[in-house]
Amino acid sequence: MQYRLSSLLYAWRWRRAQKTAGPLMAKATYEPLESEERARLNRLCREFPQLDKEQEQFERFAKQFHVAGEQLPIDLSGRINVALSEPLEYRRQRLVGVYAATLAIALLVAGIYAGVMLIEGSNTDGRQETAQQASAPATVAPAPQEPITPAMAAMNGRLARAMEEACRMVDDSDRIGAATLLEETIADASDASLAGEALLLLADIEYTYLQRYDQALEAFETLRGSHPDIFDSRDESMTRYELLLEAKHEEFAPLHHLDAARDHGSFQELERLVVQYPGTLLAQVAIEEMGRLVKGPEQGGMLNLAEALEEVRAQCSEPVAAAQVNLLLGDHYRGALNDRARAHAAYSRAAASDHIALSHRAHQALSRLE
């Protein structure tokens, strides 16, 4: 998992990119784009390479319906010239007539449909009532959901606009302004149904972009207490919360050291953190960062993760760090790849460690394999 990546903000930027690029791709299928439009589309495609596939789909779709002018079965130029030579007022009157006819047909269809539904509904109600009278015991209908009040809708609207604006502000590097906006809006609309999503976004900004870990922990705790369904549905949120709890007793110094090691791109600094905080979630995250350094962030997949961890272990100079990598390798081989032989080998190497706690965990893992 890429802990520095904000999934919420990435999703927001991706939706905005799709909204901008879609019309440009569609236009490009039937006429050349202006230079500014082409530059904007190219920039979006560089930022989001997955847009290239969408552009290819647009082009393939357009080719299915492209017919060269000489292949048309009839010559429409005469009728087109006549239509173009008509007085403007006449064309407007005819267009109004077409709209009126279309509207009349739509209303007629809607009226017929409504009538059928009313008749069918009354028949259904009668049949259901008869069936309910004949059945025993009677079933209890579920309690109706509480409707959204105008006040609730207004609060949700304010929160939605604040979240959209906060994402834009983060995109423009105004992270403190984004957090302040969300805090103030959440305080005024804490009972809204969108308050949980807004709290999650606030915690994400505090953790990922501002590194104000005390405020991030406060936001996560509020989210966990007030909106447990949203908190429990996000693995990223639970992982960050656990990291914050681990680092809280040292005033979040371990997380700040992790940030520095990431920023420096230093394998040695990350390895020192693994040695300094053995058996912790922070050590696991540091090892994953070491894997990204040796294999690159774009190489994903289960097998690539195993290869990255093998390479990390080979480069470790500290035995305690190597033992923890072996534990992660064993877990990965056993769980994700179902390779018991390699899992046993990795756990056995960890069990030989001089670190008592890590060796004990490895022996426990070996006993579970038997």
Image (cartoon, helix red, strand yellow):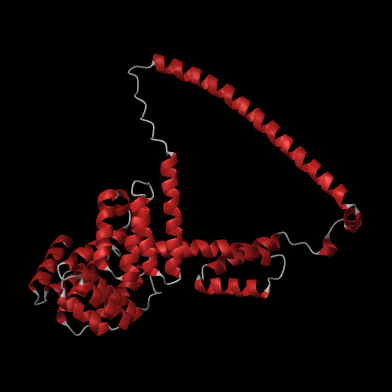
Q: Position of residue 340 (x, y in %)?
A: 23, 65
Q: Residue at x 62, y 62 (%)?
A: 23
With respect to residue 209, does 241 lie above or below?
Answer: above
Q: Is residue 359 left or right of residue 144?
A: left
288 or 201, nearer to the observer: 201
Q: Residue at x 19, y 81 (%)?
A: 272
97 or 283, nearer to the observer: 97
329 or 286, nearer to the observer: 286
- From this viewpoint, is residue 322 visible? no
84 or 310, nearer to the observer: 84
- From this viewpoint, is residue 61 visible? yes
Name the quarter where the N terminus is drawn.
bottom left
Q: Position of residue 247 (x, y in %)?
A: 19, 68
Q: Is residue 38 left or right of residue 70?
A: left
Q: What is the tally of numbered marks visible in this picture?
A: 0
Q: Quadrant of residue 202?
A: bottom left
Q: Position of residue 70 (x, y in %)?
A: 85, 64
Q: Residue at x 50, y 73 (%)?
A: 47
Q: Quadrant of residue 234?
A: bottom left
With respect to residue 232, does 253 lie above or below?
Answer: below
Q: Is residue 214 left or right of residue 25?
A: left
